[in-house]
Amino acid sequence: MPVKAKNCALLLLLAALAAGGAEGPDHLFRSRAEAEFARAQKAFQTSTNTMSAAEPLARASFDAADLATNETAKAAFAQAGITASREWLAHAPKSAGGHYYLAMNLGKLAEAEAPSLAAYRLVHEVEREFKTAADLDVSYDFAGPARTLGELYYQAPGWPLSVGSRHKAREWFERAVAVAPDYPDNQLNLAEAYLKWRNREEAAKTLQRIEALWPTARTNFTGEARERDWLDWEARRNAVHAEFQKLYKTKA
């Protein structure tokens, strides 16, 4: 089937899946993500410059996959993002963003296919693409390659099941904070990890940094695109403070 025909069929499939999704707390964000995906997919189908159209589709596909209400929809969105990312890289093979969003969409496909041997294999491809993005430009998306590598090593099972590693998670989380210290996600990841590993001193320092950066972050990261981020960040900020008090019976 020609690529354009495949894209049209995919768009129809995703529309049907989205229509059947149940409402929940992320309903508004999911609706926005699906609308942006539809716009980006249409532009990609009709554009004579696939490079410029591939980049927004890679991003929109990941956002839609991240909010999908079932694994079939998640896989379909992720596959669209993988296709767009590979098109992006075909024109710009040394683009950190292209490798980054290829890894992000591959990760969502792995989530949709887990648990399976295919998902296990995808994790290694995700790791490789994030490392390539980090080598090319570790500062991309507020240290996104470092942040996501840390998340991968933090969340994945350890050897021999997968690539999980406490040592590597700490290394990449700390690198993300060093590169983009004012981005809330970077500091929150590190605080959560320190608390899990019962590193009281470092957790306390990180919580203090979070409090110091919060007012400025509130003015720097604004707009509709950041609404979901702030719901997540505020909840996690409250959770890490509560966990610290629970563990050590004191405020950081």
Image: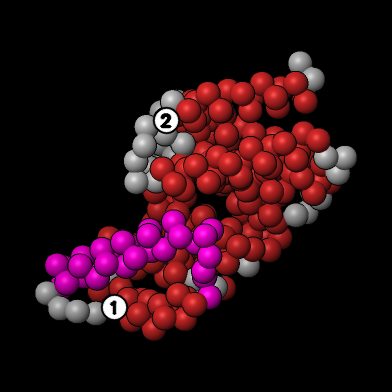
Colour pattern: secondary structure
SS of the residue at dot 1?
helix
Q: In the figure, is residue 185 to the left or right of 51? A: left
Q: In the figure, is residue 250 to the left or right of 185? A: left
Q: Residue at x 80, y 49 (%)?
A: 52
* Secondary structure mostly seen in the magenta stretch: helix
Mark 2 neighbour class, 10 Å CA radius: few under 14, some 14 to 19, many 20 or more: some
Q: Quadrant of residue 78?
A: top right
Q: Residue at x 57, y 60 (%)?
A: 144
Residue 54's spot in the image, x, y percent? 74, 44
SS of the residue at dot 2?
loop
Relative to the observer, which residue lies in front, 208 or 31? 31
Q: Residue furthest right?
A: 48
Q: In the figure, is residue 172 to the left or right of 12? A: left
Q: Nearer the viewer, mark 1 or mark 2?
A: 2
Q: Residue furthest top?
A: 1
Q: Residue at x 72, y 36 (%)?
A: 42
Q: Is residue 142 magenta?
A: no
Residue 205's spot in the image, x, y percent? 33, 80
Q: Quadrant of residue 15?
A: top right
Residue 178 visible? The answer is no
Q: Amino acid at mark 1?
A: Ala
Relative to the observer, which residue lies in front, 115 or 57? 57
Q: Residue at x 14, y 67 (%)?
A: 246
Which residues are the magenta region?
220-248
Q: Amino acid at mark 2?
A: Gly
Quickly name the residue at label 1.
Answer: 204
